[in-house]
Image: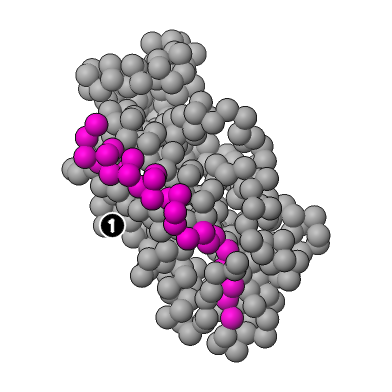
Amino acid sequence: MNKAILTLAFAVLFVLNAPAQLLYKITGNQLASPSYVLGTYHFAKVSFVDSIPGMRAAMDATGQVFGELDMADEMNPANIQKMQQAMMLPEGTTLQSLLTADEMTRLNAFMKDLLGADMTHPMIAQQMGRMTPEALQTQFTLLTFLKRHPGFDVQHQFDSYFQEEAARQGKPVGGFETMDFQIETLFKGRTLERQKQMLMCLVDNREFMELMSDEIVNAFYSQNLEAISKALNEKMGGQCDNTPEEENRLIYDRNANWLKQMPAIMADKPTLFVVGAAHLPGERGVLQLLRHAGYEVEGVK
């Protein structure tokens, strides 16, 4: 077991005794009523909602829900088409033309173990051979999780539950970002060469990636933001680690942009903000940025 994996193994044990907090109340700075921010994990079970202290009360006390994206936009047919196009390689380019023969061999071995088939199968090659490395990495991450956690309901996700419940109650729903922004950030922010590097990092380090995923799951269900942050920031060394520029694009620049929007949103009506848990902790996380902006932020117990 290498040093990075050993570190993660000890971190899993740390989770069990850590403080539990995913939901935070926002007050002060002339807010007429409290707002709330919840850290989520997209692979969590919807039933976990009732395990979060004060969650139902916060949902009842707020007049609208804001997420990273308005989920209704995600289901818009035009946006679905944009996403599908963003996940495909440029015309005339295939995955086989991007990867070396040795990289294809390693990828096929990974896929054979995960899917029971690889790119030598005509149907798999047709479906996946023209996907970008970024899109493939996303698909493999989901499929790996489903294989290790059977019974997860892809159609009813924790992230979207809160917007769906707000809509059911007739409350407004909004998003910080547009679908176009998320497509550019999540699927087009890296060059194809860099995407290929990160895909091969997943292929070549499956044990590490699976252990990190397990740690994040355990940390989330223990409601421990510190442990989630620790797992996400575990370094392997070399090209497999996010660069500072990539971390800024994926996390910190977005946090700062959300903070520009939150004061007006909260002033309009008490709001439940629902964003990925990785965006909350740290000096540049949403919680600390809110404090720097003059708000009081405390965990709901």
What amino acid does circle 1 point to? Glu
Q: Is residue 236 above or below residue 144?
A: below
Q: Is residue 76 visible?
A: no
Q: Residue furthest front?
A: 17
Q: Is residue 228 above or below residue 156?
A: below
Q: How is the image coloured?
A: one colour
Q: Mark 1 — residue? A: 245
Region in magenta: 1-27
Query: Residue at the spot x=42%, y=26% of the render?
Result: 130
Q: Residues within 10 Å of mark 1 (few under 14, many from 20)?
A: few
Q: Position of residue 112 (x, y in %)?
A: 40, 15
Q: Position of residue 281 (x, y in %)?
A: 42, 63
| Magenta stretch: includes residue 19 | yes
Q: Position of residue 207 (x, y in %)?
A: 33, 30
Q: Position of residue 173 (x, y in %)?
A: 69, 62
Query: Residue at the spot x=62%, y=30% of the render?
Result: 151
Query: Residue at the spot x=62%, y=84% of the render?
Result: 31
Q: Is residue 160 above or below residue 116?
A: below
Under tag 1, what secondary structure? helix
